[in-house]
Structures are given as structure tokens and as C-alpha cells.
Image (cartoon, rainbow, N blue to C red):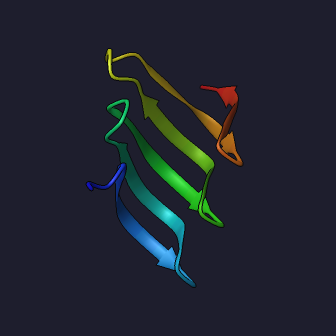
Amino acid sequence: MGEKSDYRGMFMFGQKHGFGKLNDKVDNSLYEGHFLNDKMNGVGTYTFSDGKTFTGIFINDVLESEH
């Protein structure tokens, strides 16, 4: 069985932490930005499979404000 996502970036204590790229292989989306405690936290860009992007501040995997 294959992986559902591919993460390239920094870790701390086994969790995504710092800058990284997360490619979701199920829906072909991509997040490039900051992580904290294994979640999207901080400035980042989320790209959907159709090419539409959102750049802003993420808090606990949720886009809180768009730039």
C-alpha cells in the first residue's frame, strides 16, 4: 500500500516543524510553508490540483487570513 502524502522538510521530535513541502497524493494538492507541531502553522501557500492557490497565514491546518 502506498503513502498518502509526501513530506519534505524539517522535523522536531518526530513531527513536521519548520519549513517544508507536503504533497497530498490522494487529492494532488501541495502545501509549501511553515509547520508547527505536525500541522500547517504560519505563512504558507496551498495549491489545489486545479492550480488554484491560496497564500496566507495558517493556524492548525486552517487558512486564517489570505495575503
Point out the residue furthest to the front here.
Answer: 1
- The vertical placement of 35 against 54, above or below, is below
Question: Which image quarter: residue 17?
Answer: bottom right
Q: Is residue 37 left or right of residue 3?
A: right
Residue under the image location 32 percent in, 32 percent down: 28
* Residue under the image location 37 percent in, 52 percent down: 21
Q: Residue at x 46, y 61 (%)?
A: 19
In the image, residue 5 above or below residue 14: above
Quadrant for residue 53, please give it: top left
Left or right: where 4 falls relative to 16: left
Indicate the quadrant containing the C terminus: top left, top right, bottom left or bottom right.
Answer: top right
Instruction: Where is residue 12? Give x, y as percent.
Output: 55, 80
Position of residue 65 measured from the top left corner of the image (x, y, whole percent): 71, 28
Q: Quadrant of residue 35?
A: bottom right
Q: Residue at x 38, y 65 (%)?
A: 9
Q: Is residue 49 left or right of residue 35?
A: left
- Number of numbered callouts drawn: 0
Quadrant of image for the N terminus: bottom left
User: Where residue 8 sits: x, y (%)?
Assistant: 33, 62
Q: Nearer the viewer, residue 27 or 44?
A: 27
Q: Residue furthest bottom?
A: 13
In the displayed structure, would residue 25 be above or below residue 50?
below
